[in-house]
Image (tube, coloured by chain):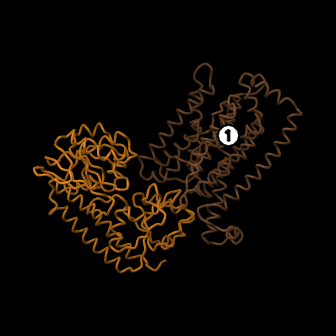
Chain colours: A brown, B orange
Amino acid sequence: MTTDLLHQAAPAARHRNGAALGVGLLVLIGVLAVVCVMSITLGTRGIGLGSIIDAFRDRDDSVDATVIREMRVPRTLIGLSAGIALGLAGALLQGLTRNPLADPGIMGVNTGASAFIVSSIAILGTQAMTTYIWFGFIGAAVSVVLVYGVASFGREGATPVKLALAGAAISAGFYAITTGVVMTNIDALNQMRAWQVGSLAGRYWPELQYSAPFIVVGAILALTLGRALNGLALGDDMATALGQRIVLTRSVVFVAVILLAGAATAACGPIAFVGLVIPHVARALCGPDYRWILPYTLVLSPIILLLADIAGRLVLKPGELQVGVVLGVLGAPAFIALVRNRSLAKL
Amino acid sequence: MSKLRFVVPAVAAALILAACGSSDDSADGEKWSYKSGDGKTYTADEIPDRIIAQGESAAALLSYGIKPVGIYLSEPVEQNRSLAGFDLDGIEILGEEWGKIDAEKAAELKPDLIVSSYWPVEKAYGGMENAVEESSKKVGKLATIVGPTAGESIETMLTGYEDLAESLGADTESGDGAAAKADYEAAKERFKSVVAEKKGLTALGVSPADDLLYVAVPEHSAELTDFVEWGLDVTIPDSPNPDFPYWENLSWEKADKYQPDLILLDDRTYDTSLATAEKQPTWTSIKAVEAGAITPWPAYWVSTYADYAEQLQKLADAIEKADPDLT
């Protein structure tokens, strides 16, 4: 902790570091652009580059053009926004709780949103994205309040360990609700499987249209919180001593997390690991300064989410594997590798 | 383990219920015997009368006036199509979710027979598949479990239920059961003649979900097997899911891969499935959809002659209206 402070206080080192990190970020933005192009060109349906260009230029009504314009492009944009949302939400929660294992999944935010959406569909019938995105937010908010509330019992307040335990318990509870609703409703079996495992398939312009605005607001909010999170990383007492308004900061972080994770879950179901692993990758690349961790996470997360989605499209042709499953398979060993390589206690 | 499971019930049944046994040929002096879907013939000294049945099998028994003491289902009872219209008063409901049967309640009923159809792909009776909860599997050991195979055709299965009902003492030669069978024979003949008039008509069984379009493999659907047998050209998908060969999983991007003249849409979730499909930009890339040639396919739930007769008449209507030259 003290070394971090010294490090940040050294202007020369920071400057040099900043230039390198800036270049690195630009390179990653280039990679993200390439991945987006890949996501539009690769899929279960083989479509030649010529047809893809035609789809945008001629606006014809061929099936290929429909697939590109109505399916792959919105899918890519949903992947992009959901990746950004989940990654940032994870970074914010890790910073806020000083808990290396915090992520929207572990805190029960995704599962809470999912459980509320599924219950609303079961009780009120199938609805438009416009309606159930609000249930997503309510679910995300309820789980954040519950987890934080439960973890705050006791004298020492919401310690990282208590937060993780409360999150795991409440997350399991919400997952049970989702599974229960899905299993007991025959209509739900096929239609709601997506609320158990996240997927970018079958989501098109409407899903993007109603989730993206919230994600944009949440992301902007998140990017302004870098300095505040750096302060919180010193511990509540130190942060207060440095003049931070802890309660206000926490509240703003929670609002951002609820917006980001709630909207991402409403758009594509619960997706784990992005929010957990990517902030660690970002931290490994740029050190403990949240003013860099947040933008790095923002760019890295959609790269990984889209690559996993592309892999899921190609491994099971003519079917597809849900991106939530791919990330589960790839994310677990990646996370173990991270844990082994870095001392996570440094948070 | 999975192999063991098929030996164990027979052995356990012999040990626990000395009255019941299993052998390949029925010996003299045994009052009840039945050749089950797993290929074995089961026998008992007394005609079983305390039966626990899986939902669809219960409907089949009820159609012959045989009332089980308990039933277990894969869905809430009011959502079960085959049990609609039957009086379920006095029948204990042991489970309303796939894979979950209340073993304690089932044991209290002291069953002497369990009836469920046999699924050759899973090599198990419905409700006793490998993935169900352990407690459910215990139910399979309370008594001998029998039932016709669901893996050949509905006709074979209905004949199997008829044989079973007869072995249990029901009158299958007259009454409602016989009347329903006559309706079925008539519906089947009409189906055949309607199909014969539509030379070149192709059909495809589908079940749309929000991330994939499931395309039915006819040989693993008892209904589609019948339709093929009766002359309907049901398209065979070329790459079924190796882990679950009932379907080919088609990504929505490839929804236009097969172009049938008539779509048979899984009717277990007809309305929601159709709504989900209509959300997909590529659903209308199937010409039959564009032409409105979509009809309900009674998928995996028919277990009585009455239901099958009704469904076959509806299908015949749809086939009559379909255009064999659409594609």
The percent coordinates of residue A78 (x first, y second) are 64, 53
Q: In this image, A193 relative to A140: left or right? A: left
Q: Residue at x 18, y 50 (%)?
A: B43
Query: Quarter of the image holding residue B99?
Result: top left
Q: As drawn, which residue projects farthest toward the left?
A: B29
Q: Residue at x 63, y 28 (%)?
A: A160
Q: Eyeballing the image, is A90 above or below A346?
A: below
Q: In this image, A253 relative to B195: left or right? A: right
The amino acid at mark 1 is: Ala
Q: Residue at x 38, y 41 (%)?
A: B133
Q: Chain of mark 1?
A: A
Q: In this image, A192 relative to A264: left or right? A: left
Q: Residue at x 73, y 29 (%)?
A: A233
The percent coordinates of residue A254 (x first, y second) are 65, 36
Secondary-structure class at tag 1: helix
Look at the image and tell me in which quarter the C terminus of chain A lies.
Answer: top right
The percent coordinates of residue B326 (x first, y second) are 48, 78
Q: Which residue has dot 1 on it?
A: A256
Nearer to me, A257 or B24: B24
Q: In this image, B153 relative to B110: left or right? A: right
Q: As drawn, which residue projects farthest toward the right?
A: A12
Numbered circles on residues, count: 1
Q: Eyeballing the image, is B74 above or below A294?
A: below
Number of residues whose C-alpha sits closer than 10 Å to that of mark 1, classed few (under 14), some (14–19) or many (20 or more): many
The percent coordinates of residue A116 (x first, y second) are 52, 43
